[in-house]
Amino acid sequence: MTVRPADRADLLDVLRIERTAFSEPWPYAAFESVLDAPAFLVAVGDGVDGPGTVLGYVVGDVMPNHGRDIGHIKDLAVRPNARRKGIGRRLLREALFGLALAGAAVVKLEVREGNQTARSLYREEGFEPTRRVPRYYGDGEDALILVVDVDAWRSEA
């Protein structure tokens, strides 16, 4: 498996994965608008479509914040038949590293309160809950805002 920046040719595969993973999927135009984000990455490898199949993706960007920029993991998903193989973890780690290199001191994300699989991954990667946002999702489920400090990662590069 290889992780690389997403390009326009990946967008239909990314959209297919998005639609299988989320009840409120992003539209194609949303992915198109973040193609230049510092951490829009795809994992490619052997899959149902042969070698070079997009197995998962992550979208992350950096927002200026008074000298302590904030990274934001906006989206992360893996094909259903490729889950539980470490692909999501690898995408997350590479995105965090890329966001740190792009200037982020901390990285945040939102996760459904009931998504125990994702919450476990994020906890294992150092994310800490900072607050709950009631009824964040369209179906009324709360979101947890999680944050991890990546400031020291730049010095490791």
Image (tube, helix red, strand yellow):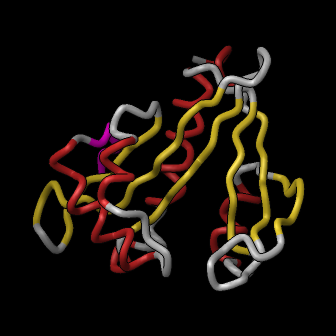
Percent position (x, y) of residue 143?
Answer: 75, 69
**Whether residue 72 is situated above or below residue 28 in the rendered picture:** above
- Relative depth, front residue between 45 and 92: 92
Q: Is residue 120 left or right of residue 17?
A: right
Q: Is residue 24 left or right of residue 152?
A: left
Q: Is residue 53 left or right of residue 29?
A: left
Percent position (x, y) of residue 12?
Answer: 21, 61
Q: Tally the numbered discs.
A: 0
Percent position (x, y) of residue 155?
Answer: 67, 14
Q: Is residue 12 magenta?
A: no
What's the residue at 32%, 53% (across, down)? 29
- Relative depth, front residue between 145 and 32: 32
Q: Is residue 4 magenta?
A: yes
What's the residue at 84%, 53% (across, down)? 128
Residue 56, quarter of the rendered image:
bottom left
- Relative depth, front residue between 36 and 102: 36
Percent position (x, y) of residue 1?
Answer: 30, 52
Q: Residue furthest bottom?
A: 139
What's the residue at 38%, 69% (across, down)? 18
Quadrant for the C terminus in the image: top right
Predominant SS of the magenta segment = strand
Q: Residue furthest left?
A: 50
What's the residue at 33%, 79% (across, down)? 81
Q: Which residues are magenta?
A: 1-6
Q: Residue furthest right?
A: 131
